[in-house]
C-alpha cells in the first residue's frame, strides 16, 4: 500500500470506498431520476475504467496515456487540471486521483502553480 493523500489505502480500495458512499447516498436521499442516472453512469465508468487502472498501477505497471485519459473521463471537465481544489468535496476528482496515484499534496501543488502563473500574468494582485 502507499499513501494516497486520503489515508493509507490502495487506490482501488479508495475508489471502492467512494463508490460505497455514493451507493449509500443514492439509497438514502431523495434524488431526481435524472441525477440518479448521471451518478450511476459515472459510477459505472469508475468501475470499468478507474479500478482496473488503479490495480495496474498497484502492480507496478506503467500507465499509458490512454490509461490516464480513461481515468480522467470521470471528472466534470475530463481532466483533473480543471478540477476544484481539495477544499471542495468531489467524488469524481478523488476517484481520478486515486486511480492515478496522485497524492493530496501533489494535487495541491497544481493549485499553487496556477495561482502563481495568474499573478505573474497580472490577472490579479496578491
Image (cartoon, helix red, strand yellow):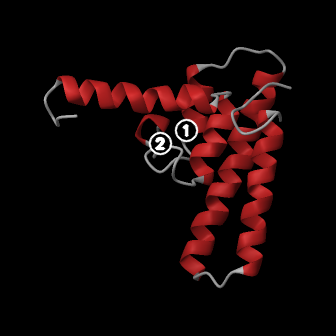
Mark 1 burial class by Cα count in 10 Å: few <14, some 14-19, many 20+: many
In the depicted structure, whether residue 47 falls above or below residue 106: below
Q: Quadrant of residue 95?
A: top right
**Depth order, front residue of 57/5:** 5
Q: Please give the name of the residue rendered at 47% of the width and 42% of the height, measured from the top-left corner.
A: 78
- The residue carrying mark 1 is 72
- Compared across the picture, whether 113 is left or right of 97 comes to left
Question: Residue 19: image x %, image y %?
Answer: 75, 56
Crowding around mark 2 (Cα neighbors within 10 Å: few <14, some 14 to 19, many 20+) is some
Taking the spot 78% from the left edge, 70% from the top edge, the residue there is 24
> Where is residue 94, by image quadrant?
top right
Q: Residue at x 40, y 29 (%)?
A: 112
Count numbered badges in the picture.
2
Q: Is residue 71 left or right of residue 62?
A: left
Closer to the camera, 16 or 122? 122
In terms of image quadrants, where is residue 70?
top right
Q: Position of residue 110 (x, y in %)?
A: 44, 28
Viewport quadrant of the C terminus: top left
Whether label 1 touches label 2, CB < 8 Å: yes
Q: Which mark is residue 43?
A: none
The alpha-carbon separation of the residues under discs 1 and 2 comes to 5 Å
Q: Is residue 37 left or right of residue 21?
A: left
Q: Which mark is residue 78?
A: 2
Residue 108 position in % (x across, y down): 51, 32
Along the polypeptide, which appears first: circle 1 or circle 2? 1
- Dot 1 lies on which element? helix
SS for dot 2? loop
Q: Is residue 108 above or below residue 18?
A: above
Amino acid at each position: 500500500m502507499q499513501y494516497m493523500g486520503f489515508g493509507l489505502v490502495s487506490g482501488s480500495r479508495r475508489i471502492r470506498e467512494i463508490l460505497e458512499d455514493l451507493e449509500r447516498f443514492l439509497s438514502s436521499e431523495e434524488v431526481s431520476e435524472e441525477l440518479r442516472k448521471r451518478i450511476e453512469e459515472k459510477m459505472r465508468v469508475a468501475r470499468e475504467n478507474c479500478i482496473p487502472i488503479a490495480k495496474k498501477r498497484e502492480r507496478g505497471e506503467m500507465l499509458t496515456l490512454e490509461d490516464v485519459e480513461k481515468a480522467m473521463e470521470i471528472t466534470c471537465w475530463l481532466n483533473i487540471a480543471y478540477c476544484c481544489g481539495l477544499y471542495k468535496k468531489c467524488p469524481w476528482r478523488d476517484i481520478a486521483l486515486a486511480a492515478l496515484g496522485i497524492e493530496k499534496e501533489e494535487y495541491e501543488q497544481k493549485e499553487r502553480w496556477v495561482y502563481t502563473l495568474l499573478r505573474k500574468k497580472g490577472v490579479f494582485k496578491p
